[in-house]
Image (spheres, coloured by chain):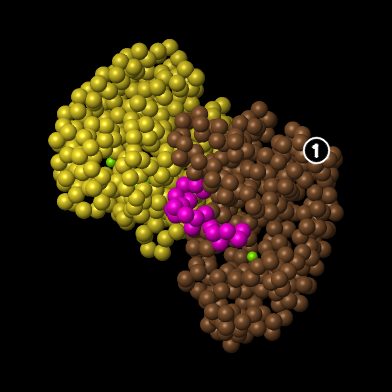
Chain colours: A yellow, B brown
Amino acid sequence: ISADLQEHCKQYKLPQQSLDWFTKSLDYNTVGGKCNRGMSVVDTTSLLQNKTLDPKSEEYFRPALLGWMIELLQAFFLVSDDIMDASKTRRGNPCWYLAPKVGMIAINDAFMLEASIYILLKKHFRQEKSYIDMVELFHEVTFKTECGQLCDLLTAPEDDVNLDNFNLDKFTFIVIYKTAYYSFYLPVALALHYIGAATPKNLQTAEDILIPMGEYFQAQDDYLDAFADPEVLGKLGTDIMDNKCSWLINQALKQVTPEQRKLLEDNYGQKDSAKEAKVKKLYHDLKLREFYEQWEEERVADLRHKIDKVDESEGLKKEVFEVFLQKIYKRTK
Amino acid sequence: ISADLQEHCKQYKLPQQSLDWFTKSLDYNTVGGKCNRGMSVVDTTSLLQNKTLDPKSEEYFRPALLGWMIELLQAFFLVSDDIMDASKTRRGNPCWYLAPKVGMIAINDAFMLEASIYILLKKHFRQEKSYIDMVELFHEVTFKTECGQLCDLLTAPEDDVNLDNFNLDKFTFIVIYKTAYYSFYLPVALALHYIGAATPKNLQTAEDILIPMGEYFQAQDDYLDAFADPEVLGKLGTDIMDNKCSWLINQALKQVTPEQRKLLEDNYGQKDSAKEAKVKKLYHDLKLREFYEQWEEERVADLRHKIDKVDESEGLKKEVFEVFLQKIYKRTK
Ligand SMILES: [Mg+2]
Ligand SMILES: [Mg+2]
Ligand SMILES: [Mg+2]
Ligand SMILES: [Mg+2]
Ligand SMILES: [Mg+2]
Ligand SMILES: [Mg+2]
């Protein structure tokens, strides 16, 4: 893929220094993630076509390429999100904008990661009937994610803690738009387009199941951030200190007494571990662990019910959604 | 147009605060420019169709909409370029990222300006035969501009002056990719697609004339930056202090003696008006004014020759290029 993109740039006679830079950015920012989203395209395609795909075959290569495009989209979002959040590390390495000599050039690098999607789509999928639909799908999902990111940035600025900004509706909007569309809906929608089964009904079914699944996933992520054993989770949760508009804080705000709300206002969103501990203590007092566990069971039951009702007559399969749900349910990291 | 985009966002139930923000960003960043690029689509369409377009008619509205998409593309580039260059003002106002409360949110705002192009294209041009070609044209030109921007950022960082980095090939690459494609080629190519005359030959002819015209335009821009009367130009040139890889410095580097080169190395690219004056003095000693004037005549003669040979049989017209050239030749601001 990197070779493909380099070849495209060489047509432009892009100076060597710039070509090397772009190659390095591609490598730094797309390799080393978990590739969950990318692999979902391959796995979904394999399930829908009801066959195992040989990793060396063209049949495997094409959905994998679509998967890499999701990884490129994610890289575009992460590189820029890290700048906007002034984050320090990503996947155990310094954020790209903090790497030597990069700085704000990272903004243009993020653009080039996004643009790469369409170069690859054109090069490899131009002949497909679903080409324009896939292009539009990427546009639509990109814009939705940017809307979610905007709402997140306006709702939870790290330097201006104001719990009045938070509410469950905004939490839901942010989660669905910023995360669920590109992480959950996009891989399945791409696979449907790829195999030629992207009927309006199938796309709607996928959206109706995968968006609530993404919501559940994020609530779980927020729950684990505060309640999981950091050893098992593999990282220290920082949502409370980061003033995150998380599922937990929103649930807490719905239940607190005026005194407890005062406690949250005084302690949430500050880089102070004593204050963080007070918020965690309140989460325990409010029994948010138990509340989450019960809520999880309800959501999972609801998802199972929806999956059960999936109409497979237009080429969709319940199994696609079951596999997604299995990866999430009861995960500990 | 803003209303169109707001309506699209309302489908998403984007919270009001985010919608207001996006509306403000659209307004701040697309209004107030000269709209040269945008108007070029209308003017070119009018010439090619050989009729005056009534500003209140649909015939006028559609090419004007394509023009606005170029303005959105430009806004996306300018908002982000100002962050990358740490600029202070744009069109007489503070740069968007320096406006109250904006900061790095401007990065995401830039993304949304870009994404708006494809929302509008889909909404208004989806039925056209040339829809996918216009989408691909925007993708291609966007990526080219990003390649030019990358080369510019790597060649002329403001904090690391190294004239060894400069040469005319890089100058040419930067100018063509960063500016000429989107400012000169894109408006005409869009107009050709719009009227259904985007044959491979016409597109090639447009590129062969408009890219050198963009090169000429930028050389002139760099020349005016140092040699024009600031009163007439309407701004103070800052290219020398900004370490810009300009046409003048590249021409100077080709002609200097070792002593003169030493003078440039000691004085170029520094925020010091005494040093700037020394560089300007050298430009005068090297007779760059006279050199430019002669070079301009040659380039314009060459462009006129190319325009003269344009084959109008597939619906293209010499006049389109003549109008572009008239706007540029001998301009003083
Ligand atoms: Mg972040
Ligand atoms: Mg963020
Ligand atoms: Mg988390
Ligand atoms: Mg700039
Ligand atoms: Mg710049
Ligand atoms: Mg200039």
Count residues near mark 1 (Cα–Cα under 10 Å), then give few for <14, some for 14-19, many for 20+: few
Picture quarter containing residue A179?
A: top left
Question: What span is in magenta?
Answer: B89-110
From this view, report whether residue A113 is shown above or below residue B177. above
Chain bearing tag 1 is B
From this view, report whether residue A124 is shown above or below residue B332. above
Q: Is residue A87 left or right of residue A315?
A: left
Depth check: give the residue in front, A9 or A264.
Answer: A264
Which quadrant of the figure contains the C terminus of chain A?
A: top left
Which quadrant of the figure contains the N terminus of chain A?
A: top left
Q: Is residue B172 left or right of residue A59?
A: right
- How many numbered dots are placed on residues in this image? 1
Depth check: give the residue in front, B195 or A290.
Answer: A290
- The residue that mark 1 highlights is B54
Say which residue appears at 60% left-offset and 36% top-offset.
B3
Residue B203 in view, yes or no = no
Q: Is mark 1 within 8 Å of ligand 6?
A: no
Q: In terms of secondary structure, where does tag 1 sit?
A: loop
Residue A146 spot, x, y in % from top left: 46, 41
Q: Is residue B156 magenta?
A: no
Say which residue appears at 53% left-offset and 66% top-offset.
B155
Say which residue appears at 61% left-offset and 82% top-offset.
B277
From this view, report whether residue B68 is shown above or below residue A251. below
Depth check: give the residue in front, A289 or A30.
Answer: A289
Q: Is residue B211 left or right of residue B174?
A: right
Q: Is residue B104 magenta?
A: yes
Residue A48 in view, yes or no = yes
Residue A241 spot, x, y in % from top left: 25, 48
| Type of amino acid at the residue the image marks with label 1 | Asp
Say which residue appears at 49% left-offset and 44% top-offset.
B21
From this view, report whether residue B32 is shown above or below residue A263. below
